[in-house]
Amino acid sequence: MAGPLPHLPVAHDPAPDRLAEVARNAASAVPLTSLMQGQTGVICETRLDVDDAALLRAMGLGDRVRVKLCRVGEPCVVALGTTAGRHCHCQGHCRIGLARGLADRIFVRVVA
């Protein structure tokens, strides 16, 4: 009869860490349209269909992008800031107008 199996190290699975991060972000996320004019947030979640999400990413609005709300209403106008620590190639001068219904489905963490 063989003895007890030796303790084997378990590889770290990053998925639980990522799930915890998503849960924290979701708890503190607010719709982009709830920001006040001039307020800044970081995109942490979108509730868009695949085509709309792809179009926004192509325009520079993706996960972890810092946005400043320039105009509330229709259209909702945002200025792009940084993406994961890197500045947009436009030096922060890009502005994008979004339909209010689309902006309602983009969620941000407010930056103090």
Image: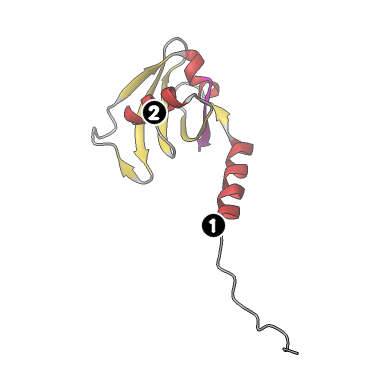
Q: Main secondary structure of the magenta part?
A: strand
Instruction: Name the residue carrying label 2.
Output: 54
Q: Residue at x 50, y 25 (%)?
A: 48
Residue count near mark 1 (Cα–Cα under 10 Å), binned few <14, some 14–19, many ≥20: few
Say which mark, if any, is on residue 14: 1
Quadrant of the rendered image containing residue 8: bottom right
Depth check: 20 or 88 in front? 20
**Could you tell me which residue is drawn at 54 percent across and 27 percent down?**
47
x 48%, y 20%: residue: 103
Q: Is residue 93 above or below residue 6?
A: above
| Disc 1 element | helix
| One can see residue 38 in this view | no
Figure quadrant of the N terminus = bottom right
Q: Is 110 inside the magenta-drawn segment?
A: yes
92 sits left or right of 27 in the view:
left
Residue closest to the far left: 90
Q: In this orientation, which residue lies closer to the viewer: 103 or 37?
A: 103
- Residue 94 is covered by the magenta coloring: no
Where residue 105 sits in the image (x, y, percent)?
53, 23
- Residue 99: numbered disc: none
Q: CA distance from mark 1 to mark 2?
A: 25 Å
Mark 2 belongs to which amino acid? Ala
| Residue 42 or residue 19, whichever sits in front | 19
Amino acid carrying label 1: it is: Pro
The segment highlighted magenta reads: 104-112
Disc 2 packing (10 Å; few <14; some 14–19; many ≥20) = some
Left or right: where 21 falls relative to 72: right
